[in-house]
Amino acid sequence: MKIGVVTFPGSLDDTDARRAARTAGAEAVALWHGDADLHGVDAVVLPGGFSYGDYLRAGAISRALIKNVHRKFICKDQRLRIENNTTAWTSAYDAGQEVTIVLKNQDGFFVADDRTLDQLEGDGRVIARYLDGNPNGSYRDIAGITNERGNVVGLMPHPEHCIDTLTGPGTDGLAFFTSVIKTVTATHGDAEENADAEDGATAKAGA
């Protein structure tokens, strides 16, 4: 099981993400943003950091993140509730489980129109929500969302900083990485059992 971690110029959490992948039991593969392929990895992490010096503005890729409502950078241990544990990246959690994950951002305010928010809620695509107060103003206290298939997850807090008690507030972040290992391993097993019908079937995931 290989987890690739993409590095952009200015990335600062890529080393932590690779360490988290190794701690979870995967082989961590360093990927450069300009690589022509993914080098055979089974899952991909796009870690946080000030890519390109943030000249594009943090959150520009997602188009759904703006400056925190209080206009200040925050760094804290943040409590979350796992709302959806059926995705590739959250399956090792219990639904409704409360966890503590490091949060550090200045542009972490998640915004969307009411129609989009209602659709995300209705489809069960909100995977995590802030507890004990909203730290950045994100609409409906949303801390993370997933795509319809559940193989792509976007999360504002940083689980890679919560994989051991020496360097973080605990180990609550590790399950994000063990989740995808379990999901990919199970998918590969099913593909091998049904090789005649689905030759070469694989699962790809990204956070």
Image (cartoon, rainbow, N blue to C red):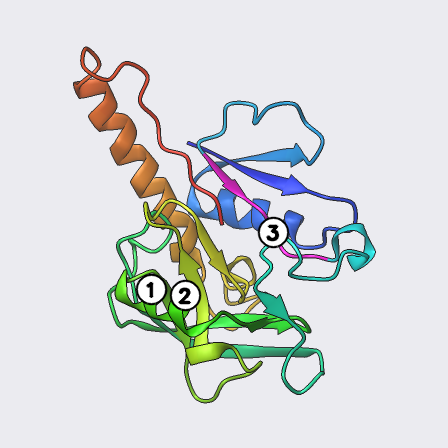
User: Mark 1 belongs to which amino acid?
Assistant: Gln
- Asked whether residue 133 is drawn in magenta, I would say no
Q: Quadrant of the N terminus?
A: top left
Front disc: 2 or 3? 2
User: Mark 2 belongs to which amino acid?
Assistant: Thr
Does 126 sit above or below residue 132?
A: above
Quickly name the residue at label 3: 47
Q: Position of residue 179 (x, y in %)?
A: 34, 49
Res 171 visible:
no
Quickly name the residue at label 1: 119
Quickly name the residue at label 2: 116
User: Mark 3 belongs to which amino acid?
Assistant: Pro
Q: Secondary structure at mark 3?
A: loop
Q: Which residues are magenta?
A: 43-49
Q: Give the residue drawn at x 57%, y 50%.
A: 17
| Mark 1 burial class by Cα count in 10 Å: few <14, some 14-19, many 20+ | few
Q: Secondary structure at mark 2?
A: helix
Which one is nearer the viewer's eye here, 43 or 160? 43
Res 201 visible:
yes
